[in-house]
Image (tube, rainbow, N blue to C red):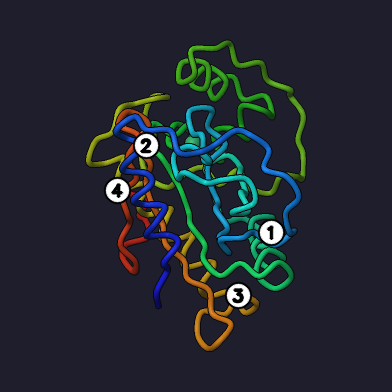
Amino acid sequence: MASLMTDRYLENNRQYARGETLHKAAYPGKQPIQPSKRVAVVACMDARLDVEDLLGLQTGDAHIIRNAGGVINDDAIRCLIISHHLLNTNEIILIHHTRCGMLAFTDDLLKAGLEGDPGASKLLGQATSRAFTSCSKCAAAPAAFHAFRGPIEPLDTPRNEKNIERLQWDVRRGISSIVNHPWIPTTGPDAVTVRGFIYDVDSGKLEEVSYPGPMGSIG
Ligand SMILES: [Zn+2]
């Protein structure tokens, strides 16, 4: 399945990594509601990612869905279904990135800290170089934080073989969640394409994640 715009945005990203500015900030005037390049991007909320800049997107080109990690959770799926079936997008781009905060904790650790576990609070404080203040209350929601699987590391650790593998696992889990969803077609005349990437916050470059492949181990 061809994903022509994704390839063009990858070329844009190579220019971005060389220091060229492709995204124009100027408001271009009246535009249709449907994204003109038929693209939907799911990316992490990290402050170092300027999604429009790093892909060379212009206003009106694409939907951009962002959350902590760029994970495919219930809300991301909701957005992608609306984006495709009502607003005509047919290429999905997932972006995780190096030094992501989601590599530095586990769901259990954060929940325990929030609920009042002093040991968890201490570890979270050490990991984030910030006093972690517990709320000492339980909560039913969010049901999950979707921290990335695998052994945790200090916040903002530079890229290495292990954390790149953990990022790749989660990109693949996201792709799998999308392509196996009954309301997101990947074959036939209404098919969407899905490709996943890791953005290197130090170099500005996107690297594609192969799919299918390993999706994680707790070891
Ligand atoms: Zn992140």
Q: Secondary structure at mark 4?
A: helix
Circles 2, 3 touching at the beta carbon (< 8 Å): no
Of 84 and 29, nearer the camera is 29
Task: Quickly name the residue at label 2.
Answer: 16
Q: Which mark is residue 171?
A: none
- The residue mark sitting in front, 2 or 3, is 2
Q: Quadrant of residue 90?
A: bottom right
Residue 214 placement, left or right of 129: left
Q: Earlier in the sequence, mark 2 or mark 3?
A: 2
| Label whose residue precedes the other's in the sequence (4 or 2) | 2
Q: Nearer the viewer, residue 160 or 207?
A: 207
Question: Marks 4 and 2, Cα distance to the nearest angstrom?
Answer: 25 Å
Sequence-wise first label, 4 or 3: 4
Q: Which residue is mark 3?
A: 184
Earlier-in-chain disc, 3 versus 1: 1
Alpha carbon separation for disc pair 2 and 1: 27 Å
Q: Position of residue 184 (x, y in %)?
A: 60, 75
Marks 3/1: CA distance?
11 Å
Q: Is residue 156 left or right of residue 121?
A: left
